[in-house]
Image (cartoon, rainbow, N blue to C red):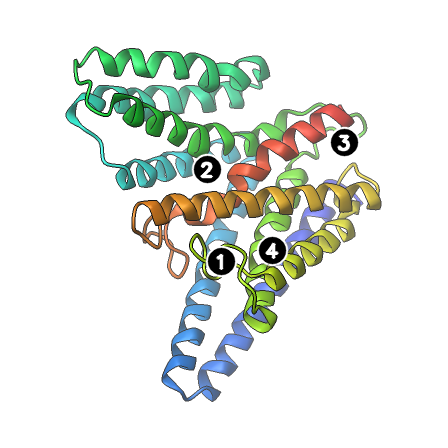
Amino acid sequence: MNLDQDLMWLGAGVGGVLVFASVVGAILAMRVKSEAGRATVANLNARTRAWWVMALVFATALAGGRMGVVVLFGLLSFLALREFVTLTPTRRGDHRALFWAFFVITPAQYYFVGTGWYGMSAIFIPVYAFLFLPVRAVLAGDCEHFLERTAKVQWALMACVYSLSYVPALMSLPIAGYEGKNAKLIVYLVVVVQMSDVLQYVWGKTLGRHKIAPLVSPSKTWAGFIGGVLSASALGAGLWWATPFSPWQSGAISLALTLAGFGGGLVMSAIKRDCGLKDFGALIEGHGGVMDRMDSLCFSAPVFFHVVRYFFT
């Protein structure tokens, strides 16, 4: 298969799943009569509509090549960073540091990713931004909760910008025999990680009884976790033909991605609970905010990038 055929098959698969979900949602909307059941179905249909929009936006970005993906994830990072900072109260002394985080550091990170400058994109935020932001903040002369405030801004940049920037960075990996096909790696990553979330939700709703961390995320159960991780790993193994991996390698990598994604979702849930909120925002119908949808990718994207870079380049 060539690149176009592979992407067409992947797109057809995603479209088929969304069509199936839409049909099931329409049938359930006609048949379910109880108030609680109708609320659940309405939420399911809202999520499906949002998935349609997200899939179309993602496909448009892929059509734009490397720059299209860089622009999309740069925008997503900006929105996620905004949501994250909004949840964590700041003081007047943080405003200049936040200006740098939003309008200098974030665009610079994606510039380095877009130009394929791996060395700088890998250390810019963890080293230079990490050192610069507290210096900029301390010049405001506000020492109250200084360590806590600085750590929140640094953590926000790491999660919302640095980690997510590893998704478009996949486009620049020089994989022998896979030249010009890296867009499929991004599709593979997003499909495996997002389907893991969906399948964990489905398994949890159908068989879930025992909660993993009820005070952190009441909806996460052992049945949902095990069923979702194994199902998504099997899906990833089945998608080996779109990657430079063998079937067993694809399955192992998918397992690592789903575990990392689960950890990311749990960590972000803890942050929301700490702030007394259910969602990071309300931008995406049925899903919450951008960060609610990107939380798994924040942890899985760096893992995927470095596994591929270390073993396949």
Please give the label number shown on residue 51. 1
Q: Which quadrant of the figure contains the N terminus?
A: top right
In primary-sequence order, the first of circles 3 and 1 is 1
First of labels 2, 3 by sequence position:
2
Q: Which residue is drawn at 64% across and 49% down?
A: 192
Q: In which quarter of the image is residue 306?
A: top right
x%, y% of residue 85? 30, 35
Distance in Å between CA atoms under marks 3 and 1: 29 Å
Within 10 Å of disc 2 (Cα), the crowding (few <14, some 14-19, many 20+) is some
Q: In this view, does 35 lie above or below 194?
A: below
Which quadrant of the figure has residue 198?
Answer: bottom right
For disc 2, the marked residue is: 72
Is 217 on the left-hand or right-hand side of 145? right
> As rendered, which of 102 and 69 lies closer to the eye?
102
Residue, disc 4: 195
Which tag is nearer the camera, tag 3 or tag 1?
Answer: 1
- Cα gap from disc 2 to disc 4, whole angstroms: 20 Å
Residue type at numbered disc 1:
Trp
The Cα–Cα distance between marks 4 and 3, rounded to whole angstroms, is 25 Å
Looking at the image, can residue 175 be seen?
Answer: no
Mark 4 Cα-neighbour bin, 10 Å: few <14, some 14–19, many ≥20: many
Q: Do the residues labelled 1 and 2 touch (CB within 8 Å)?
A: no
Label located before the other in sequence (2 or 4): 2
For label 3, the residue is: 178
